[in-house]
Amino acid sequence: MNNLLDIRNLSKHYDGFDLQDINLTVPAGSVVGFIGSNGAGKTTTIKAALGLIGTDAGEIEMFGQHIAGRAGSKQTTAMKQRIGVVFDTCSFPEEMSVASVGSLMGYCYSSWDSARFDDLLAAFGLPRNKTVKELSRGMGMKLSLACALAHNSELLILDEATAGLDPIARDETLDVLREFMRNDKHGILMSSHITSDLEKIADYIVCIDKGRIVFAVEKDEITDIAGVAHCRQAEFDALAESGFFEPGEMRYLKHTYGTAVLVPDRFAFAENFKTIALDKADIDTYMGLMLKGDAR
């Protein structure tokens, strides 16, 4: 499988923050969910991949071509013709109308499809005569997404693109992204705090914390296979001594009324520990136990 984006050992130093040895890939035909708390390094990683900031170490490839690790490189400029980008704020001039934004994009992208842009405006309910400053946050996100999709992008990079949208609008946006992914040569890197959206569309989940990748797994390993066991103290002690977990691989959080334990395979766990309460995992719970849980 070809990788549309391949980040290897990326590092960037700031005073008070270090992005260290980031490895992240977006295979063709896949949606990669990029998660982590505010300030964890998601946006820094995305900006580095786009050449918006320089890097201190590492390599970046887009569409199989090496991208120089500095902002404004010729390679990066050429690759941007094939990438659609949506950040968490609408970046167009406030006085421009929605229609004027489309005209501007036509000058920026050689493959700009004005008919596709008009179709997306209609689908998103965006009035052509409204100015950017008159748009709500959610409508601004829709405009940014329409621009990202209207120049025949192959790779979408979305940084909190569904933030500010109500649940119905988010579902409509996810439908548009699913349509985009019907082409198995396309791919999406989607940073989001709304993990329920990622559960609906992502193929892989990559989590970053304090500038380091904590885990990178297939989404189904979390939502279809993993579980959370709820143990009383005696059950927790017995589980810890059972040998079910390798040393250092048991992740748990103690609460007032018991202990939550992350279970990589809830089916195998249920066979071995029939009396311990067990739930399916979701992305939020999995991430919380991986980031905040103790290891044993």
Image (cartoon, helix red, strand yellow):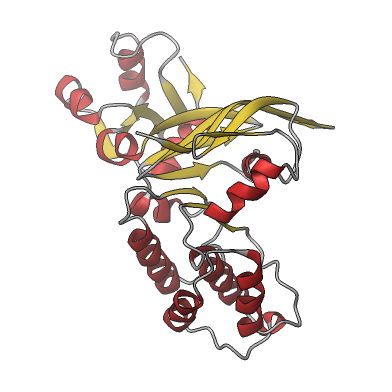
Quadrant of residue 285 within the rendered picture: top left
- Tell me which residue sits at (57%, 76%) in the image: 139
- Tell me which residue sits at (45%, 84%) in the image: 122
Q: In this view, does 141 lie above or below 256?
A: below
Work out which residue is located at the far right of the displayed protein and give it.
15
Q: Where is residue 23 in the image (x, y as percent from the top left)?
A: 55, 27
Q: Is residue 75 visible?
A: yes
Quarter of the figure with the C terminus: top left
**Residue 170 horizontal side relative to residue 231, left or right:** right
- Tell me which residue sits at (56%, 68%) in the image: 147
Q: Position of residue 143 (x, y in %)?
A: 57, 73
Work out which residue is located at the far bottom of the displayed protein and give it.
129
Q: How many labels does the image show?
A: 0
Depth order, front residue of 233/59: 59
Q: Position of residue 140 (x, y in %)?
A: 61, 73
Depth order, front residue of 26/268: 26
Q: Can residue 39 be seen in this view?
A: no
Quadrant of residue 107 within the rendered picture: bottom right
Q: In this view, does 232 lie above or below 163?
A: above
Q: Position of residue 98 (x, y in %)?
A: 62, 82
**Residue 222 horizontal side relative to residue 102, left or right:** left
